[in-house]
């Protein structure tokens, strides 16, 4: 019952946090274009600025995600969750106040800096929360439900943006971010007990507890930064399990293609079919509804029958198909048809995370999820550097040949690489990592 209570509060926290984040996506493109290239439907500078922001955020999260995951194993999930949820509020509040050019650049700088810490952090810690409270044989389904909650927030956020003005959208987003933070701090309980939190932060190995003071620990100096994972730690984690390393490769190429798609898609649709915020919102709502239904209803049924490995391959196959369909879109209705394929491609992310969670012990869930998030963050660095210039080139008048969706076709090819790698994964029984999984303990 306590675990269900934690999951319930976690799901609502994730919903509110994602709702505030997703609802500003359809209007951000219009705000960016209005501030930088007013009156134009194609703007290479806006594409390059977005690419730079994503690359810098990716570099930051490449370092921060493994650290956050590792520290959450030591200090608790809730303490680490507070930081990104607080920082997210600041850039939203700036555009809620004004969207003129000067305020946009202030938002741009702060958004870039905060994204280095916040990008993907809530999702990473939420996955660790689930792994703490759900048995291994049920994790794939619950990871799917967690992704479904995020998809539901995606739908509700974009649906709200469809009927709100640009100013009201940022104001509501800021308010919901504050509500999410307060709700999390008041209602969400940490999923790691206090005794376990204190031990790994210390520099010593075993820590003896004084029976006269059961809540107190030894007076050794706490060395928080010794918990920072090194490259050697991550390499060791990848080498420990072949399945883990294969899942990491799939996560990298899958994220590389996904980030490349969404870095290019909205600018492509605006230039190709003159989409605006309402069209973007409609497109995202369609994809979000299909993904939500799939993750909340279809995936919990299919996961026990087919297993994470097969579902992962199915998700990546349809991910590739929908990218290719976007790239060759010949009419304005085709992107809406492509968005419907999210009913299948949403399987990929929760399946990768579930496979990874079963390859490490209970005390290493934060480190494992942080490692995969760090690998995805590296893809976030590479992807905009490759696909944004490609998009700007093929949307300009100086394109080598006329093919506006060429960069999106390339993301589909990258997704196909992830699909082929997923076919090679053989999911063995969960393993325990010697010297790691039993590291968090207290001697009586």
Image (cartoon, rainbow, N blue to C red):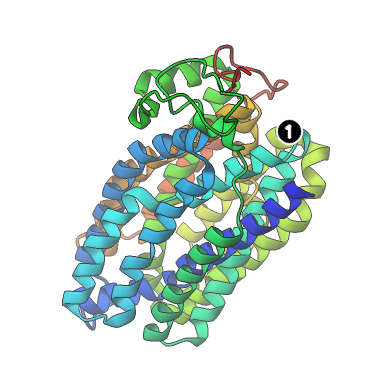
**Residue 11 placement, left or right of 183:** right
Secondary structure of the residue carrying tag 1 is: helix
Which residue occupies the extreme front position in the image?
A: 212
Question: In front here: 372 or 380?
Answer: 372
Q: Quadrant of residue 296?
A: bottom right
Residue at the image point whose x is 51% and y is 70% from the top: 179
The percent position of residue 169, horizontal first and vertical second, equals: 43, 80
Q: Quadrant of residue 386?
A: top left
Q: Where's residue 418, x and y in %?
A: 52, 36
- Say if 69 sits above or below 329 in the image: above
Q: Is residue 62 left or right of residue 3?
A: left
Residue 366 in sight here: yes
Seen at 27% across and 56% down, the residue is 112
Locate the C terminus by quadrant: top right
- Packing grade of label 1 (10 A; few <14, some 14-19, many >=20) is some
Q: Nearer the viewer, residue 42 or 171?
A: 171
> Dot 1 corresponds to which residue?
136
Report how many numbered discs are placed on residues in the image.
1
Q: Nearer the viewer, residue 295 or 384?
A: 295
Viewer-proximal residue among 318 and 358: 358
Is residue 128 shown above or below 371? below
| Percent coordinates x, y for residue 408 in the rendering | 42, 54
Placement of 22 over or under 6, stated as above or below: below
User: Residue reaching furthest left?
Assistant: 102
Residue 334 % position (x, y):
55, 68
| Residue 394 appearing in the image | no
Q: Which quarter of the picture shows residue 297?
A: bottom right
Residue sitting farthest toward the top? 434
């Amino acid at each position: 019952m306590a675990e269900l209570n934690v999951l319930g509060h976690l799901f609502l926290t994730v919903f509110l946090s994602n709702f505030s984040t997703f609802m500003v996506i359809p209007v951000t493109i219009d705000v960016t274009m209005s501030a930088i290239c007013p009156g134009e439907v194609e703007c290479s500078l806006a594409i390059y600025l977005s690419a730079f922001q994503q690359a810098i955020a990716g570099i930051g999260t490449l370092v921060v995600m493994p650290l956050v995951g590792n520290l959450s194993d030591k200090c608790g999930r809730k303490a680490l969750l507070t930081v990104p949820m607080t920082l997210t509020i600041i850039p939203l509040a700036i555009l809620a106040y004004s969207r003129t050019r000067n305020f946009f650049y202030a938002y741009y700088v702060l958004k870039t800096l905060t994204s280095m810490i916040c990008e993907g952090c809530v999702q990473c810690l939420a996955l660790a929360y689930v792994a703490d409270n759900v048995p291994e044989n049920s994790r794939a389904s619950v990871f799917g439900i967690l992704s479904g909650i995020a998809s539901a927030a995606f739908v509700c956020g974009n649906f709200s943006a469809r009927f709100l003005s640009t100013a009201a959208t940022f104001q509501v987003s800021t308010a919901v971010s504050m509500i999410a933070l307060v709700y999390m701090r008041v209602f969400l309980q940490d999923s790691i007990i206090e005794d376990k939190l204190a031990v790994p932060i210390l520099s010593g190995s075993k820590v003896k507890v004084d029976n006269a003071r059961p809540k107190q620990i030894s007076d050794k100096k706490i060395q928080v930064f010794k918990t920072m994972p090194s490259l050697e730690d991550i390499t060791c984690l990848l080498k420990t399990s072949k399945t883990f390393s294969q899942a990491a490769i799939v996560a990298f190429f899958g994220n590389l293609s996904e980030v490349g798609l969404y870095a290019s898609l909205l600018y492509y649709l605006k230039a190709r079919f003159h989409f605006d915020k309402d069209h973007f919102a409609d497109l995202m709502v369609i994809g979000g509804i299909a993904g939500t239904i799939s993750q909340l209803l279809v995936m919990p049924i299919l996961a026990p029958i087919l297993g994470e490995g097969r579902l992962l391959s199915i998700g990546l196959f349809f991910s590739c198909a929908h990218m290719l369909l976007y790239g060759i879109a010949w009419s304005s209705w085709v992107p809406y048809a492509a968005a419907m394929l999210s009913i299948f491609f949403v399987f990929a992310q929760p399946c990768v995370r579930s496979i990874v969670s079963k390859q490490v012990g209970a005390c290493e869930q934060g480190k494992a999820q942080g490692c995969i998030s760090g690998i995805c963050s590296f893809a976030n660095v590479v992807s905009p550097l490759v696909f944004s210039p490609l998009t700007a080139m093929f949307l300009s008048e100086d394109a080598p040949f006329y093919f506006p969706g060429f960069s999106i076709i390339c993301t589909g090819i990258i997704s196909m690489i992830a699909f082929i790698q997923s076919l090679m994964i053989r999911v063995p029984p969960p393993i325990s990592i010697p010297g790691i999984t039993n590291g968090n303990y207290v001697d009586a």
